[in-house]
Amino acid sequence: MLILDKEYINNIWKIGLPLILQNLISSSVNLADNFMIGSYGDTNIAAAALANQFFFLYNLLIFGAVSGGIVIKAQLWGKKDIERIKEVLGTELVWCGIIGAFFSVITMVFPHRIMHFYSADLEVVNLASKYLQFLSPGFFFLSLTQVFSGTHRSIGNVRVPTIITSSTFILKIFLNLLFIFGNLGFPQMGLAGAGLGSTLARFIECLIILLYTYLCKTPIAAKVSEIFTINREIAIITMKKIIPITVNEGLYGLGLNCYTAIYAGISTPAIAAVGAVLPIDNLMYTYILGVSSASAVMIGNFLGENKKEKAADYAKKTIILSFFIGICIGGLVFILRSRILSFYSLSPISFRYAKRILGYLSIFLCTRSINYTIMTGILRAGGDVKYCFISDTGSIWLVGIPLAFFLSVVFHQPITIVYLAVLIEHFVKLFLMVRRYFSGMWQNNFV
């Protein structure tokens, strides 16, 4: 019985609770941005939604790279191989640093071209472009932060990254009050101020995680020579895991961006409704993210120690736990969705759309939570990244996007119908994930 296994519950919450808090705080930052920007009306909410969707694409790329690294470092930590963990850290830093620098440059130089991909509304594009320019330096800072935070998590140190993220959240709210609304003598910058506040907060977060890593002489405090000394064997193993997951998350993120462009083509109230709902959905998902991330670390440790039966036992219990979390949180949000959305200054039609969409997401949260837990918390922990890549990208590009395109562009259906149809892709993915889990082919020790 899940609730009677004290060892499992203690282990999952020891690692998972700080991760839940960290993800909760990170999602709350975006939600706080939306609530504050929401006072400026539908156009600003729509602009923030479009720009943040592009940032989300980037975030998924970095998440993919860091997830690939965590898979390897968790198994190496099971063998207590610190030197190789540092070598993996070095490979990740180079890879993620290149991605971060690239995105920082293109968002600074080509913000209008990027935003025109999402919308033809010039007012929305201009607002989103300015916001994206102020946000651009933060792309690089976030890449470094995620690599070091992920490495700390892979060795079981989840508390400090959570504390640092919490501090950043408080700072971000304070900076929002200064730059968005022009308090304490600062200029009132509106949406652009939210971008500036995010960049400053991410710079400080990056600085703090680096200072902690090296001043406290943590196990991952690698010297520059250790970071950039490439071990060919480790580099090959690392890149074999990192590249497929990065491409997987990138293509999935690009698919989500295509959804956003399709929604924006329906109407500005439609994309405003989606923009209002997405941070709430991310907030619902934080518990699943924490549990699945904790599961990935523990299962990776067990596989690294060749304890396959223990890994299988933890995998089964994590699926059950994530299902019940999805039922409870989804049900609560469904009941309170009108009250939650009342914090926005949405137009009546946008509010009606948002309420319907949030209802769909709440109902299907348990299905989506099982998918995510199996993919990121179980299959990837065993290095089964190719299957995850095919299943994840195939479901969105072969099912979700064609449905969204035909229903919106060809049949001119409203956003509520289009969004509901898109959720079908999660049922396709559920079949593929469950099938692979029961095959047992994910139980690999590759270090």
Image (cartoon, helix red, strand yellow):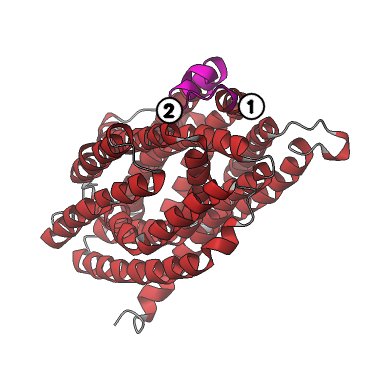
Q: Which label is found at residue 356? A: none
Q: Nearer the viewer, mark 1 or mark 2?
A: 1
Residue identifier under label 2: 94
Secondary structure mostly taken by the magenta-highlighted segment of the chain: helix
Residue type at numbered disc 1:
Phe
In the figure, is residue 95 to the left or right of 310? right
**Lower sequence index among marks 1 and 2:** 2
Q: Residues within 10 Å of mark 1 (few under 14, many from 20)?
A: many
Residue type at numbered disc 2:
Val
Residue identifier under label 1: 134
Magenta part of the chain: 104-123
**Which type of secondary structure does the marked residue at label 2 adopt?**
helix
Residue ranking furthest to the right? 185
- Residue in the foreground of this view, choosing between 303 and 15: 15
Please name the residue shown 61% across and 29% down the image: 131
Would residue 105 be counted in the magenta stretch?
yes
Please name the residue shown 46% across and 38% down the image: 56
Q: Residues within 10 Å of mark 2 (few under 14, many from 20)?
A: some
